Amino acid sequence: MILPEGAVLNTASEEVEQTSRTYRLDIERGKITGLVDGQDAVKQAIYKILDTERFAHFIYSGNYGSEKSGIFRTDYERCIRDALLQDERISAVQDFEISGSGDEAAVRFTALTIYGSVAIEKGGF
């Protein structure tokens, strides 16, 4: 093997933490309105994950999104945890409250992230 001049074998590389910086989505107006980072970016990602049906879009891997269709209310916690814990910025999902009647429910929970706790409230389950 020929190495370029100055090359060094077997050097330890430093792991660099990826930024959470992304586009800020204004869902109500259907626009991108700047950038978001840190806890706000993770909170936005949580809502996006919960609103994306897993396996429905070819642009996402099979690990992205949630499986809301065809699940029972007793499975909401498991499905939400499964969906959100795929994101390495989220370490736990806890303190679930599920309310509602008929075909739809609202969920409240806390996501523990690398940026602190995030309170989430989501209807339409």
Image (tube, rainbow, N blue to C red):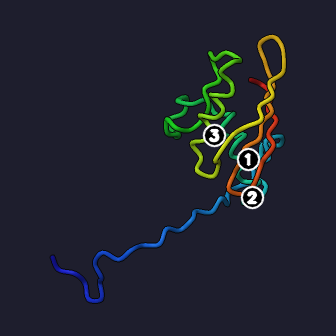
The answer to which of 77 and 23 lies nearer the viewer is 77
Image coordinates of residue 45 in percent, x first then y, are: 68, 46
Left or right of residue 10: residue 104: right
| Pointer 1 with pointer 2, Cβ within 8 A | yes
Q: Residue 47 falls in which quadrant of the image?
A: top right
Q: Which residue bears the numbered disc 2?
A: 36
The residue sitting at 69% across, 51% down in the picture is 113
Residue at 30% from the left image edge and 82% from the top image edge:
8
Viewer-nearest of labels 2 and 3?
3
- The residue shown at (79%, 55%) is 33
**How crowded is the residue under tag 2: few (<14 C-alpha within 10 Å), some, or many (20+)?**
some
Against 89, is 46 above or below? above
Q: Determine which quarter of the picture holds residue 95.
A: top right
The amino acid type of the residue labelled 3 equals Leu
Q: Earlier in the sequence, mark 1 or mark 2?
A: 2
Q: Tell me the kind of residue under disc 1.
A: Gln
Residue type, label 2 = Val
Q: Which mark is residue 44?
A: 1
